[in-house]
Amino acid sequence: MYFIKQKLTKLSMKIVVLKFGGTSVGNIDRIKKVAKIIASYKRKKLNVIVVSSAMSGTTNDLIRKTEELSNNFDSAEYDVLLSSGEQAACALIAGRLKHLGLKARSWMSWQLPIITEGPYSASRISKINKTKILTFMKTGGIPIITGFQGINLDSRITTLGRGGTDASAIMLAKFFNADACNIYTDVDGVYTTDPRNHSKAKKISKISYDEMLEMASLGAKVMQPTSVQDAKLNNINFSVKSSFEKKRGTLITGTKKIFSNQIITGITSTKNDAKVTIVGVKDKPGVAAAVFKPLSLNQINVDMVVQNISLNGKETDLTFTIKSEDLKKTEKIIKKNKRISFRKFSYDNNVSKVSIVGVGMITTPGITYRMFQALASKKINIMVISTSEIKISVLISNKQIKKAVAVLHKEFKLD
Ligand code: ASP
Ligand code: MG
């Protein structure tokens, strides 16, 4: 009984997980700044667990090297190589903290270990052995842990997909039952829309996991989407903050904790989308599957899909969107697909998907109408529409993105 009690008091000091992204540790000056941020938490008598990504550009350089050596580089060696960037960054941070007189050391994921499941380059953390980190923290030490990686049950190094340090941070927060998890990056939070495209964009102070997931997968590149999913599943609140400026960030949390009368939380737009229409395909069961199966086998991501109602009951048109970079490949695949017949293949390479996101739309009627009305008032033509419970997306000409975002931002009182 006594021992349990003592253990509890010892661990009762608060734990914060601090994640630093590639740009935050992108050069020597920035690493010095990061060390200062870490030291400021330590001064507040907090237990700090640091997890870092590689210096910006490093991972891309490593990938380039593999591509020069082989167009089919061994997947296990690929992960060993890619994980090396984080090792360097962590040693640099730890070294700087020691220079400042703090107790710190770097840990590679395999030294703990952090156990992962799943394929190389897309593994997920399943378990973290906390013993060494807890022991080190009890002596006042600051552990600096490599993000983006772990080891699998064969003791091989694995990685968590691009941007995977976000997932490392969330899972460290989960396993250590952290009191806070702060994601330091090059933007100071999540915005109502991309501030580079719209001057009236505002920082969101709180956003729900689901909204953040929609925004992230719609192209608001703040967080790796799977890490937001991990946070949601494990109910981990986290903040996105800037490592360059001292400002309040955005808190990402469960819906219940958000009190707001805002119906729409954010507006996103995509770049480089293409719309494909297959004119005159047979209107019979199995045709859509026959069109999309070879696309999926070739890793082509199909986004919005519409099939027109057949007028004569024999033929119909099928429209869908893909990334522009997949257009050539898609055309080839469709044209040589012997399982379908059609009259014409046409495409538009200058389209963009604009979406409004907000949990408020579940309980508020009339949002779709307001969106369409606002777009119509600016003579913006809608080509394709798709919706989910908390999102409405429309496909428009990419020349009209700015105008569309501006009018929607105003319509939903985000200005
Ligand atoms: N360094 C890895 C990447 O560039 C992981 C990360 O940045 O989180 O994807
Ligand atoms: Mg990142």
Image (cartoon, rainbow, N blue to C red):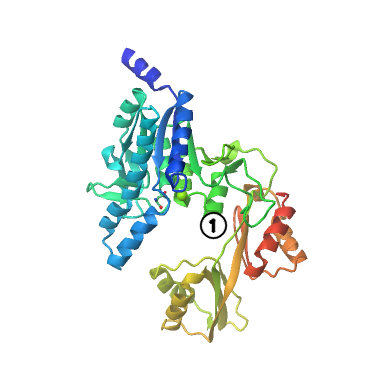
Residue 257 at x, y percent in the picture = 59, 36
Q: Quadrant of residue 393?
A: bottom right
Relative depth, front residue between 41 and 283:
41
Residue 322 at x, y percent in the picture = 51, 69
Tell me the element at label 1: loop
- Number of labels in the image equals 1
Instruction: Say above or below: 157 vs 130.
Output: below
Label 1 environment density (alpha carbons within 10 Å; few <14, some 14–19, many ≥20)? some
Relative depth, front residue between 90 and 383:
90
The answer to whether 211 appears left or right of 99 in the picture is right
Instruction: Say above or below: 122 vs 230.
Output: below
**Looking at the image, which residue sits at the far right?**
377
The answer to whether 122 appears left or right of 206 in the picture is left
Relative depth, front residue between 404 and 339:
404
Relative depth, front residue between 173 and 98:
98
Residue tagged 1: 219
**Looking at the image, which residue sits at the far bottom?**
343
User: Where is the N terminus found, in terms of image quarters?
Assistant: top left
Q: Quadrant of residue 174?
A: top left
Residue 405 at x, y percent in the picture = 67, 59
Instruction: Say above or below: 318 vs 177.
Output: below
Residue 170, visible in the rendered structure: no
The answer to whether 331 appears left or right of 143 in the picture is right
Q: Residue at x 48, y 46 (%)?
A: 228
**Looking at the image, which residue sits at the far top?**
2
Q: Residue at x 27, y 42 (%)?
A: 110
Q: Amino acid at mark 1?
A: Gly
Q: Residue at x 43, y 51 (%)?
A: 56
Q: Residue at x 54, y 45 (%)?
A: 209
